[in-house]
Image (cartoon, rainbow, N blue to C red):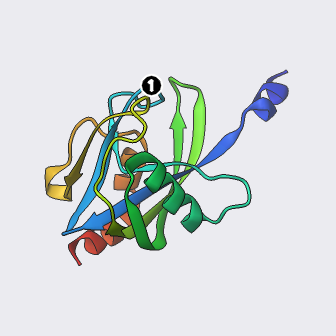
């Protein structure tokens, strides 16, 4: 019985996208989903058949109206949301802003957007950030945001 319950659970693949512009990155405040009320970079689910880079470009545009370029993978975290009974592998990417003015394009999913640096992070942060800060990837991401 326990084996059956475990096998019915699905581990999903999520993407987090650092969009860098003027040494800051875009973040949104989540709404009506796991992590409601927390802040994170744009992102979402990787679709079947798309590359991580394609997913990052698509999700960023869908959520913010911003176009990005030079997407690269910079980290992976294993994120278990016990309260929501969800499990994600989050692939963190970093990109450069290409064009567009950020706007809330999905008001059912976000209630705010702004540009931040690691010195000015909003609170509370989305759970995957806790894993990101524990990982060796955080130094690479911090360095990339300063370039």
SS for callout 1: loop
Residue sitting at 14 percent across and 51 percent down? 120
Q: Is residue 17 left or right of residue 20?
A: right
Residue 66 visible in the displayed image? yes
Residue 136 visible in the displayed image? no
Residue 131, image x, y percentages: 42, 49
- Quadrant for residue 69, please give it: bottom left
Residue 146, image x, y percentages: 21, 73
Which residue is most to the front? Answer: 100
Vertical arrangement, residue 59 with respect to residue 138, above or below:
above
Vertical arrangement, residue 45 with respect to residue 7, above or below:
below
Q: Is residue 128 left or right of residue 79?
A: left
Residue sitting at 44 percent across and 25 percent down? 32
Foreground residue among 104 and 46: 104
Residue on which disc 1 sits: 32
Vertical arrangement, residue 10 with respect to residue 102, above or below:
above
Residue sitting at 37 percent across and 47 percent down? 129
Residue 2, image x, y percentages: 80, 24
> Where does the C terminus fall, quadrant-wise?
bottom left
Which residue is most to the left? Answer: 119
Foreground residue among 80 and 12: 12
Vertical arrangement, residue 57 with respect to residue 46, above or below:
below
> Where does the N terminus fall, quadrant-wise?
top right
Q: Is residue 142 left or right of residue 89?
A: left
Foreground residue among 61 and 54: 61
Q: Total label count?
A: 1
Residue 5, image x, y percentages: 78, 25
Q: Residues within 10 Å of mark 1 (few under 14, many from 20)?
A: few
Residue sitting at 36 percent across and 60 percent down? 18
- Quadrant for residue 25, please give it: bottom left
Q: Is residue 23 left or right of residue 65?
A: left
């Amino acid at each position: 019985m326990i084996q059956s319950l475990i096998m019915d659970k699905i581990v999903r693949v999520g993407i987090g996208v650092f969009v860098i512009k003027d040494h800051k990155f875009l973040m949104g405040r989540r709404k009506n989903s796991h992590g409601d009320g927390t802040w994170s970079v744009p992102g979402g689910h990787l679709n079947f058949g798309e590359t991580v880079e394609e997913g990052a470009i698509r999700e960023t545009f869908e959520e913010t109206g911003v176009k990005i370029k030079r997407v690269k993978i910079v980290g992976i975290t294993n994120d278990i949301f016990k309260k929501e009974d969800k499990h994600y592998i989050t692939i963190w990417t970093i990109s450069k802003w290409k064009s567009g003015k950020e706007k809330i394009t999905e008001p059912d999913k976000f209630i705010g957007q702004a540009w931040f640096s690691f010195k000015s992070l909003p609170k509370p942060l989305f759970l995957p950030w806790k894993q990101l800060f524990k990982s060796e990837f955080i130094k690479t991401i911090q360095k990339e945001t300063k370039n």
